[in-house]
Amino acid sequence: MEGIIVESFTMDHTKVKAPFVRKCGTINTPKGDIITKFDLRFTQPNVSAIPTASIHALEHLLAGYIREELNDVVDISPMGCRTGFYLILVGEISEKKVAKALINALNKIIESDEVPAANAVQCGNYRDLSLFGAKEYAKEVLEKLKDRQ
């Protein structure tokens, strides 16, 4: 990997204050499309991490709810460190608009009665999901994000 720059490795994880929404990159495709990547940080790096059942449930819930809020979503995936998610979409969009969409999605998570696709046919690890945990993290992040708006 010598000479390859991984954007997330260039950020000083000791200086950020979670939760936050950060535009962390854009790519212009050969056909002229713009792909934008966002860091949706839920917990403070190197201080706390979201348990796997909770982050897995958040992933399932956000997969639908973020698409209800934003157009042209390519993917929303949990970070390996379990401190948040990467959101990838087609086009340019502001951090403020993504933050508003995330707030709306988190509100929907709090109101959810079930985790979508929580079965062996639709999920490769359906037994490792916590709706309760997802709701608790959604509440925590929502409260802190609203304070910063």
Image (cartoon, rainbow, N blue to C red):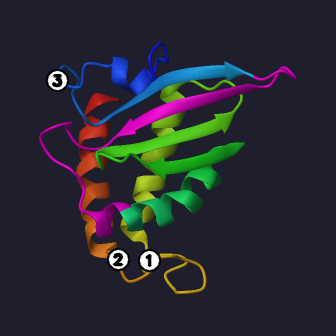
- Relative image position of residue 5 (x, y in whole percent): 47, 17
Above-or-below relation of 127 to 66:
below
- Relative image position of residue 93 (x, y in whole percent): 62, 26
Q: Give the range drawn in magenta.
A: 29-55
Q: Mark 2 points at which residue?
A: 128
Q: What element carries label 1?
A: loop
Is the residue marked by circle 1 packed among few (<14), some (14-19), or many (20+) residues within 10 Å? few
Residue type (three-letter) at the residue carrying disc 1? Asn
- Relative image position of residue 127 (x, y in whole percent): 38, 83
Quarter assignment of residue 14: top left
Quarter assignment of residue 81: top left
Q: Mark 1 points at which residue?
A: 125
Is the residue marked by circle 3 packed among few (<14), some (14-19), or many (20+) residues within 10 Å? few
- Seen from this angle, which residue lies furthest right? 31
Residue appearing at x 40%, y 61% in the figure: 58
In front of the other: 122 or 142: 122
Residue appearing at x 41%, y 54% in the figure: 106
In the picture provided, is 2 more to the left or to the right than 25?
A: left
Q: Earlier in the sequence, mark 3 or mark 1?
A: 3
Q: How far separated are the C-alphas under marks 2 and 1?
A: 6 Å
Above-or-below relation of 85 to 107:
above
Q: How far separated are the C-alphas under marks 2 and 3?
A: 30 Å
Q: Are marks 2 and 3 in contact (CB under 8 Å)?
A: no
Q: Do the residues labelled 2 and 1 touch (CB within 8 Å)?
A: yes
Q: Mark 3 points at which residue?
A: 14
Does residue 122 appear anywhere in the picture? yes
- Relative image position of residue 8 (x, y in whole percent): 39, 26
Q: Is mark 3 on a helix, strand or loop?
A: loop
Residue type (three-letter) at the residue carrying disc 3? Thr
